[in-house]
Amino acid sequence: GENVEQHPSTLSVQEGDSAVIKCTYSDSASNYFPWYKQELGKRPQLIIDIRSNVGEKKDQRIAVTLNKTAKHFSLHITETQPEDSAVYFCAASTGGGADGLTFGKGTHLIIQP
Amino acid sequence: GAVVSQHPSRVICKSGTSVKIECRSLDFQATTMFWYRQFPKQSLMLMATSNEGSKATYEQGVEKDKFLINHASLTLSTLTVTSAHPEDSSFYICSAMNEGAEGYTFGSGTRLTVV
């Protein structure tokens, strides 16, 4: 089955700086790669996703890049703000709604004021 | 947008008893629902895939007789934790894919504490 590795487990950056979180996956059949932000005790919130027919996607301060050949994808957050502090999870799926998500272990992002 | 309602949000039960968790898709039909478990400070792990009108598919290592899943209609899936023990204490969360929406919609989760 799919295996998703996520790094780093903890990331501390100064407010206003950029943060990058990286994930690799093992199943070449995976074609849907979402990123979630989760606050303690709450449901994961989708912040951005990318499908395998696209190499990069951007939404304001958040961007995701995908390298299908290398089987890795990354989350980029620019101009970080205190409210960006949370746990972020990457995930992979074959998409289509028939398969569930395989999650990475998560990254605790800390924005230092 | 697509909404999945999950109840209860919190439940405390005694060891040996059973607990039922419900997930309803409110404004769309969910042929397939997914059940995840999340232990404190850990990631979400897929437990099983629930298919309307058929048996659920369980991930390796998940006991099907302990975690009973029923998906009797296109809008309701239930997870029953049978003979719960303290090690079953966890955050259980469901999700569904809405064809009209992008991505998977998650329920709000159920915090189960077994004492």
Image: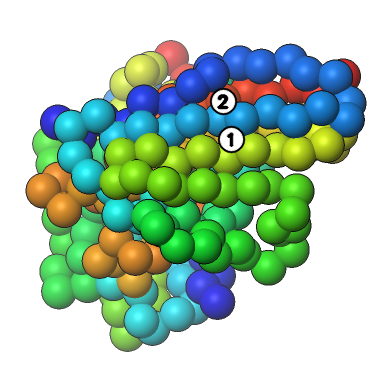
- Residue depicted at x 36% and y 18%: A83
Amino acid type at circle 1 is Tyr
Residue A98, can we see it? Answer: yes
- Residue at 88% x, 26% y is B15
Q: Which of B96 and A13 is in front in this view?
A: B96
Instruction: Give the left or right position of residue B86, taking residue B46 as reference.
Output: right
- The one nearer the camera, B1 or A46, is B1
Residue appearing at x 56%, y 30% in the figure = B21
Picture layout, residue A16 above or below residue B101: above
Residue B62: image location, x then y, percent? 71, 58
Q: Is mark 1 on a helix, strand or loop?
A: strand
Q: What is the x, y in percent for residue A32?
A: 29, 64
Please name the residue that numbered disc 2 is placed on. Answer: B110
User: Mark 1 belongs to which subunit?
Assistant: B
Q: What distance separates the C-alpha of mark 1 from that of mark 2?
A: 5 Å
Give the label on residue B92, or none. 1
Residues at marks 1 and 2 touching, judged by CB atoms closer than 8 Å: yes
Secondary structure, mark 2, is strand
